[in-house]
Image (spheres, coloured by chain):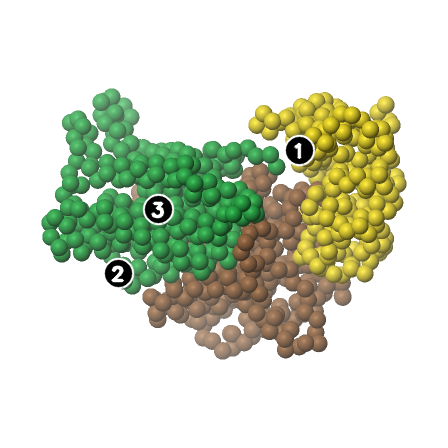
Amino acid sequence: MGDFTAQELTAIFVMQGFSGLSLFCVFLLMALGLAIIFGQMGVINMAHGEFLTLGAYITYLVSYQAAEWGATALTWYFPVAIVAAFIGTFALGYLVERFMIRYLYNRPLDTLLATWGLGLILQQVFRSIFGPREKTVTMPDWLLGSYRATDMIDIPLNGLFILVITLVLTLALFALLYRSRWGIKVRATTQNRGMANAAGINTDRVDRMTFALGCGIAGVAGAAFTTIASTGPTTGSLYIVDTFLVVVFGGAASLLGTVVSAFGIAQSQSILSFFWSGSMAKVFTLLTVVVILMLRPQGLFASKVRR
Amino acid sequence: MQRLTKAFGGTSGLIQIAVIAAILMIVLPATTEIFRLNLFGKYLTYAFVAVGLVLCWGYGGILSLGQGVFFGLGGYCMAMFLKLEASTPEATKIQTTPGIPDFMDWNQLTELPWFWEPFHSFAFTVFAVVAVPAFFAWLIGYAMFKRRVGGVYFAIITQAIAVILTILIVGQQGYTGGINGITDLRTLLGWDIRTDGAKYVLYYACCIALLLCLLAGKFIINSRFGRLLIAMRDQEDRVRFSGYDVANMKVFVFVMASVFAAIGGAFFTLQVGFMSPTFIGAVASIEMVVFCAVGGRLSVVGAACGAFIVSWAKTSLSDSFPQIWPVVMGALFIGVVMFFPRGLAGLVSDYGSKLMPGRKSRSKPSTHKPDTASRSAAGTTPQEPA
Amino acid sequence: MSNAMILEVEDLGVSFDGFKAIDALNFYVERNELRVVIGPNGAGKTTLLDLICGKTRATSGKIKFKNKDLTKLSEHQIVHAGVGRKFQTPSIYENLTVRQNLELSSPGGRTVLSSLFFRRTARLNDRIQEIAETIYLVDELDLSAGLLSHGQKQWLEIGMLLIQDPELLMLDEPVAGMSVPEREATAALLNRIKENRAVIVIEHDMDFVKDIGRKVTVLHQGKILAEGPMEKVQSDERVIEVYLGH
């Protein structure tokens, strides 16, 4: 490290740190949906990555349509795309819960296998419709360019934008889960199904909405994802293993834990990859997480319960 | 004699194995040419993994999504030996450093890495094929089961390990051959493994090893240990408070499963002639679980057949209809999990008992497992479909 | 004193996130004694059994069983030392037969290797038969345990403990959910099996307690409120207050 001046090092850390932030956003966006589905419902959704991909493809379709309509449409299509992505993935999630997941609630390992099968089918459907080549959305003008903080530090605007979306979505989810009536119902259902039922909560409905919401969030994540990378049929599945580690590492039922662990994993991977090769950085980071999980299986944030 | 039969699941169990043996060793070689038989031999190597998964997952309730790791470790150990044998100084004299494997030379390595050295010895290699994966499985199992990590957490962590190992092997090209794997393997102790004659011998060796694994699997399932596996799957605490060290039992069955997988991996390398990270990763590992689930997670013979049939179907379908295969595979998986949790073996035994109403169907343990994850309530959803 | 007592619990404490479930508890059980532990919900009864059998680890204090400190042993070692414990909800292996349930609980074949090469001896068969008679399940020996009635499951779990021949037997609400005839049969069962061993029973059902109990311990908020013969405890004012207050 002796070859770098202090100023250069700072710049490297800031820039690597910022590219780590982009990775953090992807992890967290995906993990938020999983944290609800896995953390709150105990369902392992291996097709979660495909929901993200679906959201990204919907965004692509909207941008494609907007490009036909002209420059004004192209400037403002993004909010529409987010809503469309949410609705599309929410609907698919609703159907999947209705026709598949709900028959498997008592068999978590089987859910894992069945949703993996679902993911495989979805990937092939994407490939048939959109082709194996990656698709890139046309970006609105206001997302192009970058913000020059100093001579050496250059921060791309789309990176800032996805950061904002991630933060807004996270806060909204916090509010929904811990401040709204619906959140109370979800948590009641998770903690004591029988009692929740007796208290007049329609637990079937809560399950379905929770699962669909988790998928919807993945859809929004997919829309945001298109601003920093292109979309292919297997885009989402590339991150699924990492994301599960993020959720488990954070402590499955803790949303705050998910945020912290997504940040930690993304940053260490990104900063290490400057000094080592990218693959070694990833190996080292994931290995550390696995070893920590072996020593502390309950994850970073876990509440003690009298058993 | 009768006692001996009983230890392997009674006469019907031995008949099953005899039928399999006859099909594999007489019918198939008599009816297929060597090219195809060699492919069959490749499919059979996945059957080893499936047998291990029956013990570990079907009976023990421990789902490992990282069996590819052990398959791969076994395969790589064998491949390292064969590669060294193929890299004699004479054969590699055009390299900058003759006598080391070609991919090392391409990656500017000038001497053999230390962990390659012992693989000059065949005896060590045979030992390592079993011992290296067994040690890794012991390490993972011991760390996790002693801390009572199980269920979905175990599945996720083993899957992560498969991903890590794949990235590591792909990233360290100079030491591992990278994404291409270890290729261009020629001889085993001077005997050319690429000839038709050698392929026949290797096919038969693979069959015999598989039959021995099937017998071992049957023996384990029908022992007190096998019943303990079911007991642990259903009521882990009761087993613990009946004086058993549950973690030790789980470590053992996980190590057994990994050893079976590793033997399969070694035969894969021998018959196919190369080993690459594709067979280690998360996707390969989960496909192995599909094989086992389709064949029947509670039947060693069923799971072995499942591995054979599904990988055969995969090869033929993905060659002629590459778009359809993933959909078929996915649908197969959803269908089996939702409607036939006992897989092909379950279908056969149900159908069999309908044909022969006089014969009392032996009570098979159902696949219904009590909850292993956070979801604690009995649930409002229907139980497993009949 | 050590010789007369099979179990000595001294200054035992455990807390969950600051909540003291058991607080500085002293508790002694003699050899060949049948002790009933009662108390309102949340008094720490089940936690006490959890601590003795090693399911929960004590924050402070000692648990001595035959002068051996149990707090340092792992669960299976505690079983080997001679402590058997029945859970509140019947935990049996529903996918195995009654005979297999009993066989798996018998000592011997407890390590990986010995269980792989374990063979049922004639003596074990006799023992299984004998236990089955004691727990009224002779006719159900080859039935899948999942098909038993709730009461029969409770008996089976008791049988699974008996086959280990423990010196201290701990039963958590053995008659919960039983019909009146089943309850009477269970009382008879307990009176038979308490020979040659110490038994601790947690129970809510006062009539049942009267049928089996001589000495009763009342727990409240992790502490012992009263101890003594049933009649004396029942007239204790503090006990009455605790029970009526809830």
- Local crowd at mark 3 within 10 Å, few (<14), some, or many (≥20)? many
Q: Amino acid at mark 3?
A: Ile
* Secondary structure at numbered mark 3: helix
Q: Tell us which disc is closer to us: 1 or 3.
A: 1
* Secondary structure at numbered mark 2: loop
**On-image quarter of the C terminus of chain B:** bottom right
Q: Colour of chain A?
A: green
Query: Pointer 2: what residue?
Result: A131
Q: Tell us which disc is closer to us: 1 or 2.
A: 1
Query: Pointer 3: what residue?
Result: A217
Of all chains in the rendering, the one displayed in brown is B
Q: Position of residue A17 (x, y in %)?
A: 29, 32
Query: Pointer 1: what residue?
Result: C42
Q: Amino acid at mark 1?
A: Gly
Q: Colour of chain C?
A: yellow
- Local crowd at mark 2 within 10 Å, few (<14), some, or many (≥20)? few
Q: Nearer the viewer, residue B290 or C85?
A: C85
